[in-house]
């Protein structure tokens, strides 16, 4: 978990039922509601971002992926045209 000064605030609205279950879970884990929510939200955020940063697949899926990469590519006329344009000068 991140350390440092907490200078930002996130507000959320919850239903009565959501409030009750969050408070019960926080108490059961020995945390304040804020600590419980922050821990849960940060953990989920990291999980979501990790899913997008890492490609995970089965051995069979990887073999098919690698085979597709080894196949010769198809020409895309619009891409040929784009790559044929003169470079943009930065001066």
Image (spheres, rainbow, N blue to C red):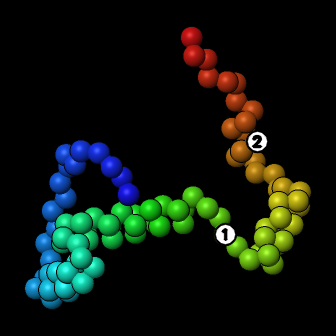
Q: Residue at x 15, y 77 (%)?
A: 14
Q: Which mark is residue 66?
A: none
Sequence-wise first label, 1 or 2: 1
Front residue of this view, candidates 8 and 81:
8
Report the residue that reaches farthest toward the top.
Answer: 91
Decide if residue 18 is on the left or right side of residue 74. Answer: left
Q: Position of residue 87 (x, y in %)?
A: 67, 24
Q: Observer-nearest residue: 47 or 31?
A: 31
Can you tell which quarter of the image residue 40 is in? bottom left
Residue tagged 1: 56
- Residue 12, given in percent of the width and then of the height, sits at 16, 68
Residue 47 showing in the rendered view: yes
Q: CA distance from mark 1 to mark 2?
A: 32 Å
Q: Is residue 22 visible?
A: no
Q: Kindly identify the residue that appears in the image at 18 percent across and 72 percent down.
A: 33
Quarter occupied by the N terminus: bottom left
For disc 2, the neighbor class at 10 Å (few under 14, some 14 to 19, many from 20) is few
Q: Secondary structure at mark 2?
A: helix
Where is 78 relative to 74, above or below? above
């Amino acid at each position: 978990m991140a350390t440092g000064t907490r200078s930002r605030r996130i507000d959320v609205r919850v239903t009565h039922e959501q409030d009750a279950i969050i408070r019960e879970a926080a108490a059961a884990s020995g945390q304040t509601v804020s600590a419980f929510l922050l821990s849960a939200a940060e953990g989920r955020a990291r999980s979501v971002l990790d899913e997008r940063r890492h490609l995970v697949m089965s051995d069979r899926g990887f073999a098919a992926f690698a085979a597709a990469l080894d196949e010769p590519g198809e020409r895309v006329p619009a891409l040929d045209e784009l790559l044929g344009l003169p470079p943009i000068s930065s001066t």
